[in-house]
């Protein structure tokens, strides 16, 4: 029986959620720009004290504007990936655990869910995939 993509994706999502890995969804750059702009404006207007005040105000403004845009990786993996990306991720994870020789989903899923070192290998692979292929930022 070949490995079922949906079941493996759900197992990966469970591992990511248990480790509380979150992904920044296109908002980190925006938040940094807001913070920098406020700090710059504060520095121009009030000098060194303005840098601190502007940085603090910019940080608060960035927080308010980007609040809710950091989501659990499991949610992103299950809901935001298209079928091609899911297949790619399953291939990457299968390669990461290739030395175990999983030939059956019945053997692979319990093995992943019960072995901490395999969970870490799978999680590292998923984090690499999300960073490199999807161009999303990982928040630990």
Image (cartoon, rainbow, N blue to C red):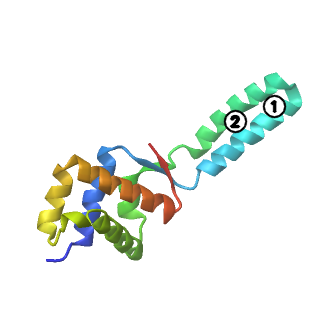
**Residue at x 82% of width, y 36% of height:** 41
Percent x, y for residue 69?
A: 52, 49
Is residue 136 in view from this perspective? yes
Kind of element beneath mark 1: helix
Total number of numbered discs in the rendering: 2
How far from the left and from the top, in percent, is residue 15? 28, 51
Residue 75 lies in what quarter of the image?
bottom left
Going 78% across and 29% down the picture, which residue do you hit?
51
- Identified at 16% across, 57% down, the residue is 111
Contact, mark 1 vs mark 2 (Cβ under 8 Å): yes
Tell me which residue sits at (16%, 50%) in the image: 114
- Kindly report the distance in space between the C-alpha atoms of the residues bearing marks 1 and 2: 9 Å
Earlier residue among tags 1 and 2: 1
Residue, disc 1: 42
Quarter of the image where the N terminus is located? bottom left
Look at mark 2 in the image and give the residue it sits on: 58
The correct choice, above or below, for 131 with respect to 116 in the image is: below
**Residue 134 seen anywhere in this rendered image of the structure:** no
Give how far across and how far down residue 42 sits, in percent: 81, 31
Q: In the rendered structure, find residue 88 and report the number of the disc placed on it.
A: none
């Amino acid at each position: 029986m070949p490995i079922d993509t949906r079941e493996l994706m759900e197992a990966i999502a469970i591992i990511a959620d248990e480790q509380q890995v979150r992904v920044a969804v296109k908002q980190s750059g925006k938040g940094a720009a807001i913070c920098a702009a406020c700090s710059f404006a504060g520095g121009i207007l009030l000098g060194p004290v303005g840098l601190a005040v502007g940085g603090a105000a910019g940080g608060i403004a960035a927080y308010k504007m980007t609040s809710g845009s950091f989501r659990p990786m499991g949610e992103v993996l299950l809901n935001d990936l298209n079928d091609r990306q899911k297949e790619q991720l399953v291939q990457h994870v299968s390669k990461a655990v290739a030395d175990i020789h999983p030939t059956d989903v019945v053997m692979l899923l319990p093995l992943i869910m019960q072995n901490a070192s395999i969970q870490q290998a799978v999680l590292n692979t998923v984090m690499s995939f999300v960073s490199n292929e999807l161009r999303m930022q990982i928040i630990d």
